[in-house]
Image (tube, rainbow, N blue to C red):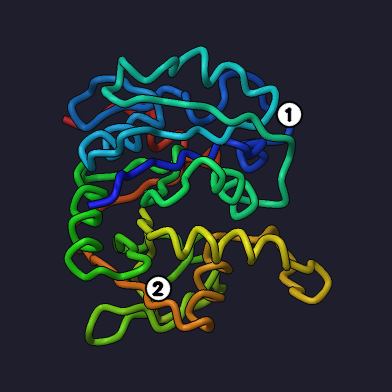
Amino acid sequence: MREIWGLFPAAGRGLRLGPGRRGPSKEILPVGGADGAARIACQDLLDNFRLAGATRVLVLLRQGKWDVPRRLGDGREFGVEIAYRVLAPTRGVPFTLAAAAPFLGDRVAALGFPDILVQPRDLLARLVAHREATQAEVALALAPCERPQASDLVDVDARGRVRRIEIKPEATTLRWTWAFAVWAPRFTRFLVRWCETFQPRSARLGREPQVGDVLAAALVDRIEIATLALPAARLLDIGTPETLARAQMPPRG
């Protein structure tokens, strides 16, 4: 099996939490655990990388978010090896991820989001095994979606392959969103080409480009995307004041 590197996008400005917000970057905000023990927001992601066997985690960091490397250091505290690439502002997450391509080489990439709390902690490890078993170019770990208007919704066929992706739909009949993505080098190259040829005027998105846009384009290009659906998985995006308050709320009982 190829070496796996984890991708940790941290180039955003956290505007959903409020444009004038002060304090730590959202990736290292304190949140509560199910056992009542406090942890930082990105620890779920780092735990998933560790359990999945990622040999290195590449933090793609926006200039000025220096509190993130101060807190995470070299990753030893979390059982992973962390490296950093500092970026000027990008057009969106796909462009942030494309900046990792020169370092990834022919490695497998594992993508998660540091502001999404995830259960179970071995979800990424299960996905890595599933992609290896299926030999799919891309594999997504699916979880039930609580907030469709803020998520990518995934439609799958009887074989568990992605048919289409709806990005932040106003209304939908779909129930699955994706928590992690694992992909082979071919998709890294596709991602870079997509970013290099992206034309905002012709895309007419009316919003910031999303990873889901790249996945949808990959489907058109006949790149097969496998899925692993876990009905018991739970996700909480702490990117808004309301969801952050939920994450920081002490457990009941």
Residue 48's spot in the image, x, y percent?
27, 39
Q: Which of marks 1 and 2 is in front?
A: 2
- When the figure is inspected, residue 241 is found, relative to residue 192, above or below; the finding is above
Q: Which amino acid does label 2 sit on?
A: Val
Which residue appears at 42% of the width and 52% of the height?
A: 106
Report how far apart the C-alphas of labels 1 and 2 lie in the structure: 34 Å
- Indicate the quadrant where residue 32 lies: top left
Dot placed on the residue nearer the N-terminal end, 1 or 2 = 1
- When the figure is inspected, residue 163 is found, relative to residue 36, above or below; the finding is below
Which residue appears at 30% of the width and 70% of the height?
A: 136
Q: Would you name the residue on which mark 2 appears?
A: 154
Residue 194's spot in the image, x, y percent?
64, 66
Are dots 1 and 2 in contact, CB under 8 Å? Answer: no
Residues packed near mark 1 inside 10 Å, few (<14), some (14 to 19) or many (20 plus): few
- Indicate the quadrant where residue 80 lies: top left
Q: How many marks?
A: 2
Question: In this rendering, would 104 be left or right of 168?
Answer: left
- When the figure is inspected, residue 141 is found, relative to residue 167, above or below; the finding is above
SS assignment at label 1: loop
Give the label on residue 20, or none: 1
Which residue appears at 53% of the width and 83% of the height?
A: 220
**As drawn, which residue projects farthest toward the front?**
106
**As drawn, which residue projects farthest toward the right?**
201
Q: What residue type is labelled 1?
A: Gly
Identify the image quadrant of the C terminus: top left
SS assignment at label 2: strand
Which residue appears at 68% of the width and 34% of the height?
A: 87
Question: In this rendering, would 124 be left or right of 245?
Answer: left
Residues packed near mark 2 inside 10 Å, few (<14), some (14 to 19) or many (20 plus): many
